[in-house]
Amino acid sequence: MSILSRPRCRTAVRALALIGTSVATAVCSGGGTDEKTCTVSSVSVQPSQVTVAVGTSTTLTAQVTSSNCSTDPAVTWSTSDPVAVTLQPNGNQVQVTGVAPTSVRADLALGRAPATISATAQEQTGTSQVTVVAAPAIALSSSALTFNADPGGANPASQPVTITNGGGGTLSGLGVGTITYGAGATGWLQAPTLNTTSANPSATLTLQPVTGALTAGTYTATVPVTSAVASNSPQNVTVTFVVGTSTTCTPTAYTVGSTVNGTLAASDCHLGDGSYYDAYAFSATATASVRFTLTSGIFDTFLFLTDPAGNLLAFDDDGTGTTNSTFRLLLGTAGYQVGANSFDPATTGAYTLTSATVAANVTNCEDVWLTPGISTAQAIEATDCLDSSGPFYADGYLMQIRAGQSVTITQGSAVLDAFLFLVRIEQDGTTTLVASDNDSGSGTDAVISYTNNGTAAAAFIIFAATNLANETGAYTLTIQ
């Protein structure tokens, strides 16, 4: 090797007293070194997926795999969605706080697109997916309850309010705040009870008034439902306690076809929702077709029909297209009571109740209520309810079936292939098909035998239809 090709070195001699020897360290500025470069081979972030509610935080940790590094390589944190989250970095950790729910992906049935939190060291990056949901929120099945009792009488039955989480995260720490009472009297509510302090999936608040020595009148109280983690705490339940006339009423005799000009007053019969009503009793023979109408220029009317035992058979709120009520019925031979009522509680004012016997044939897909014991001759026509897939035509009927009640519905015809459908109307207004039949009866007759095994009465739709497309013709519908 020539002198010019030699690497130029600077020799540093360190005299070290190590077992009587000296160590020399040579550092060359060209051609070879003992120092090695710090290299990051990978970065991962834990947890890799996490969900937080608005206003809450979680901590992510970056795990850096490196070689030849005398100190931990620096980590840089970032987020793909600064609107949804804020970051507070601290070395290889970061505190992520939910600020707003992460956006909804319209192209994914899975719903939310989480925020991507990235940790970068040198040129390596690891990520975690953070989904931000709305903060927990108190949702009440009812924000107003009404109780009724007679002066000096028994306490009314307790009523529950279901509490659920109307937001995200976990709704916990539920409690009942201080009850405030309106004018008249205080302390007439028993201590409200909560069956649990966490709505997972729900909690139940039970309220119970005590009649005690309360005199006739209307009493109010406000019960706050609280939670330290809820975004909308407190949420109030307003309790109205009507102490007044007996809920057991003696109806006034009524003749179908007559007109009654009456007035709702606080001294009238009252329902559990605090509304007043007047009851009118009448009887029907054979299968009577009757229309009732209730009108008022003062309040929003509500019209209902019961049997003498008080079982609901038919009802209507705004069937006229206004705040007045009307319904048409096919009545079996029995006694009935029609109730002139208001939609809102504690409402008074003048009303007019009318009725008339009308033709029995059901046309143009109109709503007609049925009662047990009827047998009616009808016809499927091209102007009836339409299923355009056939097309198929049908008559639709409404019927109230109480819990535990059994009914047998028969559609018989000598000219068409009968097909029956029974549909339950759910509390939220949706419908559920519970039974159907084509030929269980004689020949092509349809028969449905059904028992309401639910815990409460419900309204049902009976469709008397055909099995074949474009069929029309006469049939007989019987309810037993």
Image: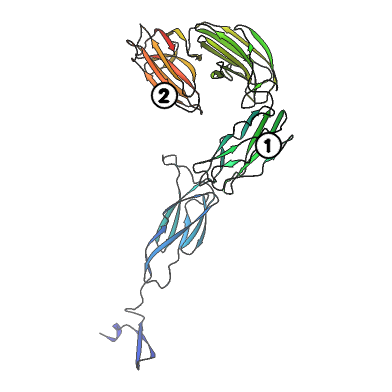
Q: Residue at x 54, y 19 (%)?
A: 311
Under mark 1, the amino acid is Trp
Q: Position of residue 160 (x, y in %)?
A: 57, 35
Q: Is residue 152 above or below residue 307?
A: below
Q: Is residue 421 above or below residue 426?
A: above
Q: Quadrant of the N terminus?
A: bottom left
Which of the numbered marks, if any, corresponds to residue 188? 1
Instruction: State left or right for residue 162 relative to residue 409.
Output: right
Q: Is residue 339 above or below residue 193?
A: above
Q: Position of residue 105 (x, y in %)?
A: 45, 42
- Outermost left residue: 1
Instruction: State left or right for residue 187 relative to residue 108.
Output: right
- Cα distance between the residues tagged 2 and 1: 45 Å
Q: Is residue 96 above or below residue 66?
A: above
Which of the numbered marks, if any, corresponds to residue 252? none
Q: Quadrant of the C terminus?
A: top left
Q: Residue at x 50, y 61 (%)?
A: 89
Under mark 2, the amino acid is Leu
Label 2 secondary element: strand
Which callout, 2 or 1, points at the residue further toward the start of the chain?
1
Q: As rendered, which of 270 and 341 lies closer to the eye?
A: 270
For the rendered model, the colour scheme is rainbow
Q: Position of residue 56 (x, y in %)?
A: 53, 52
Binning the other alpha carbons within 10 Å of mark 2 as few (below 14), some (14 to 19) or many (20 upward) gives few
Residue 389 occupies quadrant: top left
Per the image, the residue denoted by label 2 is 433
Residue 435 occupies quadrant: top left
Q: Position of residue 293 (x, y in %)?
A: 60, 13
Label 1 secondary element: loop
- Circle 2/circle 1 CB separation < 8 Å: no
